[in-house]
Amino acid sequence: MAQIMAPTIQCQMRITKNSLTASPMTAKTWSSLLLKQKKSGNTKSLSKFRVYALKSENSTINRLENLLNLDVTPYTDKIIAEYIWIGGSGIDLRSKSRTISRPVEHPSELPKWNYDGSSTGQAPGEDSEVILYPQAIFKDPFRGGNNILVICDTYTPAGEPIPTNKRARAAEIFSNQKVINEVPWYGIEQEYTLMQTNVRWPLGWPVGGYPGPQGPYYCGVGADKSFGRDISDAHYKACLYAGINISGTNGEVMPGQWEYQVGPSVGIEAGDHIWCSRYLLERITEQIGVVLTLDPKPIEGDWNGAGCHTNYSTKSMREEGGFEVIKKAILNLSLRHKEHISAYGEGNERRLTGKHETASINTFSWGVANRGCSIRVGRDTEKQGKGYLEDRRPASNMDPYIVTSLLAETTLLWEPTLEAEALAAQKLSLKV
């Protein structure tokens, strides 16, 4: 990509015959430089430097890459497990590695671990130990082989979930027999924005300036419309390798913004897969030197925000007569609108303005094929009389454990009073 290769080009321009501290380059880049110098005929004075650079800078990089790509499987049964957990902000990801004596297939085969919670904002210094409980395993696309990524949740030494552990409460809801019987499916659309490292400005945007107005960027193709496609593609493949149920990806309305979809996933699995996919995206952008943000409104003004639309259905919604079940679910969601909004992501009020394909944060609404509503129902669902609903309220930085379990709780476990239900039905013009 042009925006990613640009720093390498700048490094090429800084090389002089007295410079021995040039930035790392690939063998292909050096071959290109040598070819250009040979064509110009001015190679004599730089010949010694070129040999030095190829033997030192590039060979060092190659040796490091060889070690990073080294497959240790033929030499040992041991594997590396990367333990991943959510930090004190509720949105930051942390991880550390440990050696496991043999390959494993289930989280129950892995030991619990601990970390310094005082350094992540999750425990006081005088009692800082937080315990990691392995909950889900994914293949590691960075190390390969039998190495794994381990999604963990967090507990006190006494076995109590710490306040930032939202997975524990979600697991309780999803283990309710009524919820289990309804087999809740989720399809989550994770939007994100790529930012330039030093200036915190979207990738592809002129520093201190703005690109042309929105319109050509959504699913756009071309160097002046698509910024960060290699990152999106690398993430897509990494998710497939890891075993994440990723189902698609596309460029978004605001330039420098992308989306990927995960699902359909059942129950607690939806949250595990989203968090692991976010971890992979953080690692990939870390390697590229680009900053990932899940801010729901990274740029103020006439630019789309970033959401995490959550498609949801139950067994009853997917069967004949399911549209009536969907309408009953919408009724319940309307009565708990404030509870959902308060749990749907920090800074969401900057995004849910009633503009840029959003509903107002203060008003609950629903509609068929209407992207300006809180809840959207697809045309096919209306036509077939069964299907799913899309909750368009969650922000890009939402916690998927909270959102998925709250949808199940509100639509399957919570019962409003008959009076409240009747008033809400009248207000929403719903015949239930």
Image (spheres, rainbow, N blue to C red):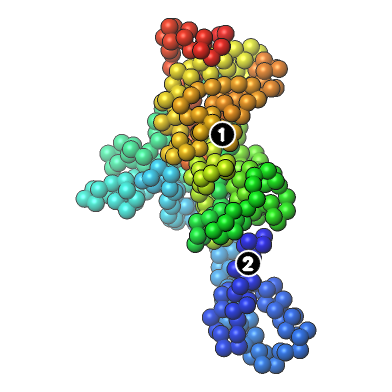
Give the SS element for disc 2.
helix
Query: Residue 377: x and y, percent?
Result: 62, 23
Q: CA distance from mark 1 to mark 2?
A: 35 Å
The label on residue 6 is 2
Q: Where is 403 relative to 303, above or below?
A: above
Q: Residue at x 50, y 29 (%)?
A: 360
Q: Is residue 89 visible?
A: yes
Q: Residue furthest bottom?
A: 44
Write down the quadrant of residue 36 in the picture.
bottom right
State yes or no: discs 1 and 2 in contact (Cβ < 8 Å): no
Q: Amino acid at mark 2?
A: Ala
Q: Amino acid at mark 1?
A: Lys
Pointer 1 residue: 355
Q: Residue at x 40, y 35 (%)?
A: 166
Q: Residue at x 32, y 48 (%)?
A: 121
| Closer to us: 248 or 82 | 248
Write down the quadrant of residue 133 in the picture.
top left
